[in-house]
Image: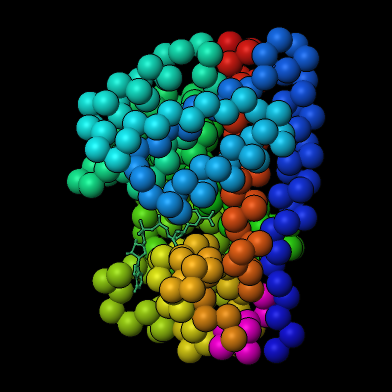
C-alpha cells in the first residue's frame, strides 16, 4: 500500500517559528523566558535528550538552566529543588527529566511542581485538569500525537482509536486528549489479553509501549493510520520505534516515522509551553 509518512518536521518548524517570535517579544520587554531542567540520573539517553532540549531552547531564545542532582538524589532533595523553582520568580517553567533515581517514581515528586510552571503536564494537578477538560499544561508527547494527526488532516471525531500504553505521561493523557476530540478510545496495555484483536478493529493505532517491534502488520487493519511514539535504543545504538515498519507499511494508509515523527513536534510543543508559562507569569 502507498503509505503516507506522517512526518513531524514541518509542523515542528512552524510551531518553532511562532514560538521564537513570542520569545523575542518577551526578551525585548525585559527578560527571556526561563526553563529549569532538573536531572537526577546518569543515563546516557537522558543526557542526550537534555542536550537536545538545551539546543532547542537556545535556538528559540529560551534561557535554560540545568540542575544536576545526581543519580543518588533523595525524594526530599528532588522535592526541595522543584519547590524552590516553583517559588522562584526567576523560573518560568520546570521540566523534571526521567529516569529518576532507583526506587523513585514521578508520582513521588511531581506534586512539588507548580501547575503554572509544569510545562510537561506531569503533576497530579495538571493531569486532573486535563481529565476534567479544564485549562492547564498537557503532556507534550500526547499533545504532539493529536497535533500531528490534525496537521495531516486525519479526522478524529467518531473514529475508533486504540492507544497501546497507559503511562501517566503518554498513554493516559493521550486518551483524554483523543476523547476531547470526540474519538472513541480504547487503551491497551501490558495485561491486555489479545493485543492484535484490540488494535485490529481500530481506525487509528497509537503505539506508546516502549517495546521494539510490538506493533506489526497483523495488529492493524487494512488502511489504518498508525502513530509510533516509541523511542527505543536498538542493539546497534539507533533510535527505533514500537512499530515494525515494513509489515505495517504493507497495510497502513499512514505511519509516523521514528525519528522525525512525534519527536520533533513534542520538543516544539514543550518550548511553546515554556513561552506560554513565561507570558502568563509576566501578565500575573
Ligand atoms: P512506560 O514504560 O511508562 O509505559 C509503557 C506502557 O506500555 C505501559 O502502560 C505498559 O502497560 C504498556 N506496555 C508495555 N509492554 C506492552 C505490551 N507488550 N503490550 C501492550 N502494552 C504494553 O513508557 P512511557 O514513558 O509511556 O513511554 C512509552 C514510549 O514512548 C517509550 O518508548 C518512550 O521512550 C516513548 N516516548 C517518546 C516520546 C517522544 O517524544 N517521541 C516522549 C516520551 C516517551
| Magenta stretch contains residue 120 | no
Q: Is residue 234 above or below residue 87?
A: below
Rendered location of residue 218, percent (x, y): 48, 89
Query: Residue 201 location, x and y as percent?
Result: 49, 81
Colour convention of the picture: rainbow
Is residue 284 positioned above or below 132 on the image?
above
Q: In this view, does 135 lie to the left or right of 26?
A: left
Q: Which residue corresponds to the image point at 37% horizontal and 59% vertical from the top-left?
A: 166
Quadrant of the image containing the N terminus: bottom right
Residue 251 lies in the magenta-colored region = yes
Ligand 1 picture quarter: bottom left
- Near-viewer residue (78 or 150): 78
- 50 vs 277: above or below: below
Residue 90's spot in the image, x, y percent? 53, 13
| In this view, 52 is above or below 208 | above
Quadrant of the image occupied by residue 81: top left
Q: Can residue 278 be seen in this view?
A: yes
Question: For the C terminus, which image quadrant?
Answer: top right
Residue 149 figure quarter: bottom right
Which x, y percent locates residue 220? 52, 83
Instruction: Report whether residue 133 is seen.
Output: no
The number of numbered discs placed on residues in the rendered structure image is: 0
Rendered image quadrant of residue 198: bottom left
Region of the chain picked out in magenta, as a range: 247-254
Amino acid at each position: 500500500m502507498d503509505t503516507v509518512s506522517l512526518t513531524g518536521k514541518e509542523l515542528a518548524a512552524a510551531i518553532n517559528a511562532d514560538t521564537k517570535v513570542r520569545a523575542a517579544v518577551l526578551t525585548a520587554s525585559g527578560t527571556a523566558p526561563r526553563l529549569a531542567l532538573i536531572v537526577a540520573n546518569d543515563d546516557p539517553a537522558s543526557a542526550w535528550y537534555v542536550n537536545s532540549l538545551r539546543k532547542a531552547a537556545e535556538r528559540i531564545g529560551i534561557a535554560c538552566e540545568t540542575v544536576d542532582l545526581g543519580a543518588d538524589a533523595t525524594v526530599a532533595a528532588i522535592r526541595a529543588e522543584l519547590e524552590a523553582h516553583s517559588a522562584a520568580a526567576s523560573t518560568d517553567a520546570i521540566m523534571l527529566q526521567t529516569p529518576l533515581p532507583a526506587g523513585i517514581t514521578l508520582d513521588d515528586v511531581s506534586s512539588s511542581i507548580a501547575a503554572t510552571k509544569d510545562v510537561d503536564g506531569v503533576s497530579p494537578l495538571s493531569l486532573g485538569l486535563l481529565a476534567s477538560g479544564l485549562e492547564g499544561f498537557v503532556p507534550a508527547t500526547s499533545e504532539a500525537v493529536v497535533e500531528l494527526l490534525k496537521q495531516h488532516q486525519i479526522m478524529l471525531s467518531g473514529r475508533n482509536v486504540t492507544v497501546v500504553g497507559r503511562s501517566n505521561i503518554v498513554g493516559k493523557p493521550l486518551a483524554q486528549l483523543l476523547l476531547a476530540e470526540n474519538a472513541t478510545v480504547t487503551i491497551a496495555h501490558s495485561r491486555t489479553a489479545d493485543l492484535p484483536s484490540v488494535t485490529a478493529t481500530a481506525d487509528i493505532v497509537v503505539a506508546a509501549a516502549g517495546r521494539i517491534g510490538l506493533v506489526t502488520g497483523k495488529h492493524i487493519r487494512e488502511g489504518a493510520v498508525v502513530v509510533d511514539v516509541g523511542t527505543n535504543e536498538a542493539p546497534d545504538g539507533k533510535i527505533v520505534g514500537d512499530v515494525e515498519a515494513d509489515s505495517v507499511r504493507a497495510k497502513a494508509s499512514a505511519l509516523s516515522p521514528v525519528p522525525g515523527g512525534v519527536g520533533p513536534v513534542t520538543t516544539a510543543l514543550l518550548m511553546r509551553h515554556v513561552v506560554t508559562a513565561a507570558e502568563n507569569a509576566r501578565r500575573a
